[in-house]
Image (tube, grey):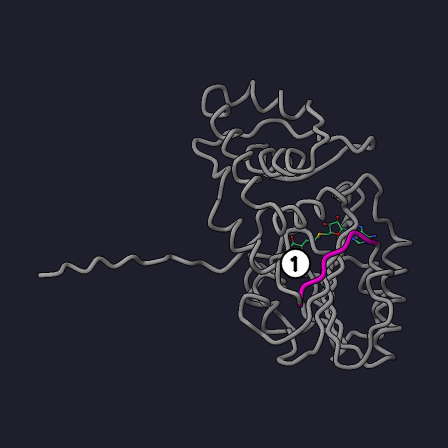
Amino acid sequence: MILKQQYHVISVAPRPFVKWAGGKRQLLPVISENIPTKFDRYFEPFLGGGAVFFSLASKERKAKWFISDLNSDLVLSYNTIRDNVKELVTSLEKHAQHYSKDSSGYYYKVRESNPKNEIDRVSRLIFLNKTCFNGLYRVNSKGKFNVPVGRYANPNIVNEENLYQVSKILQSKDVSIKCQDFEDALKGIGQGDFVYLDPPYQPVSSTASFTSYTDSDFDFTDQERLYNKFKALDKKGVKVLLSNSKSDEIIELFHEYSDGIVEISANRFINSVSKNRTGHSELLIKNY
Ligand SMILES: C[S@@+](CC[C@H](N)C(=O)[O-])C[C@H]1O[C@@H](n2cnc3c(N)ncnc32)[C@H](O)[C@@H]1O
């Protein structure tokens, strides 16, 4: 009798390989509902962890994907995962081994290091992201990563299967990734294209500001620059969807698109913007 052994390859869809401030994984259901069913080219110029890109591109939609971000370490990470995933996994395994012996001491040693080699730079970023307090990437005004160690019993430092899935999707000839400002990313696009904009949010109050993803802040003049780009794309017939905070400045800036504003409050979404509603809310603004 021949015994047949069956091997099941467990394959999951790729998802963000870093936890990123403003990450959109929780909001994917409502964002997906607001994305057009058809487009030829997809542009996401504030990529961050890429939750929306991974969710759409892994569903085998036929499109060309143009993803970018101004954070050069982040873009280097995407490129390294695409081109050198095996070496990256080996480097992360070394971090995991050292961390298991002396988590706090090893964390601060890595935080102080400044590797020149690209693979080591990226594995440092992923290692710090998985083990730092709150898992947030935040640099100070000198561009230095300054988050203290987090308390994790068993952080998933080497998520090998996901890194290989991410590598596979980035290797597609239909995916282009660049490090650039959003305005450069949105040059030369037109009808049939779709743009998802997820910029650093306009602070809701002067004390609640978090805009340091890179060492240069995204201030209100950048929000205005973004609004002007939104408007120019709208005139060209491009479909544009934007996430931002429910702040008075953003509601005022985009008032001519008020019919296309969806307020997302916790896990529900509400079609009118009320200034009196309390609790955490944010906005989706679209021109279609
Ligand atoms: C809210 S986060 C995006 C979060 C992302 N949607 C996710 O799911 O993780 C904003 C991103 O914009 C990037 N950024 C900041 N200023 C930029 C600029 N002028 N042009 C392009 N990207 C910029 C930051 O590096 C950051 O990754």
The residue positioned farthest toward the left in the image shown: 1
Residue found at x 70% / y 78% = 40
Q: Residue at 62%, 70% (x, y): give it.
A: 270
Magenta span includes 177: yes
The magenta stretch spans which residues?
174-180
Q: Nearer the viewer, residue 138 or 177?
A: 177
Q: Is residue 212 above or below residue 104?
A: below
Whether residue 152 is situated above or below residue 220 in the rendered picture: above
Q: Which residue is mark 1?
A: 281
The one nearer the camera, 265 or 54, is: 54
Residue 8 x %, y %: 32, 58
Mark 1 Cβ inside 8 Å of ligand 1:
no
Q: Identify residue type, mark 1.
A: Ser
Please name the residue shown 80% across and 64% down the image. 251
Q: Secondary structure under badge 1? A: strand
Q: Crowdedness of circle 1 by 10 Å Cα count: few (<14), some, many (20+)?
A: some
* Main secondary structure of the magenta stretch: strand
Horizontally, residue 115 falls left or right of residue 99, namely: right
Q: Is residue 157 visible?
A: yes
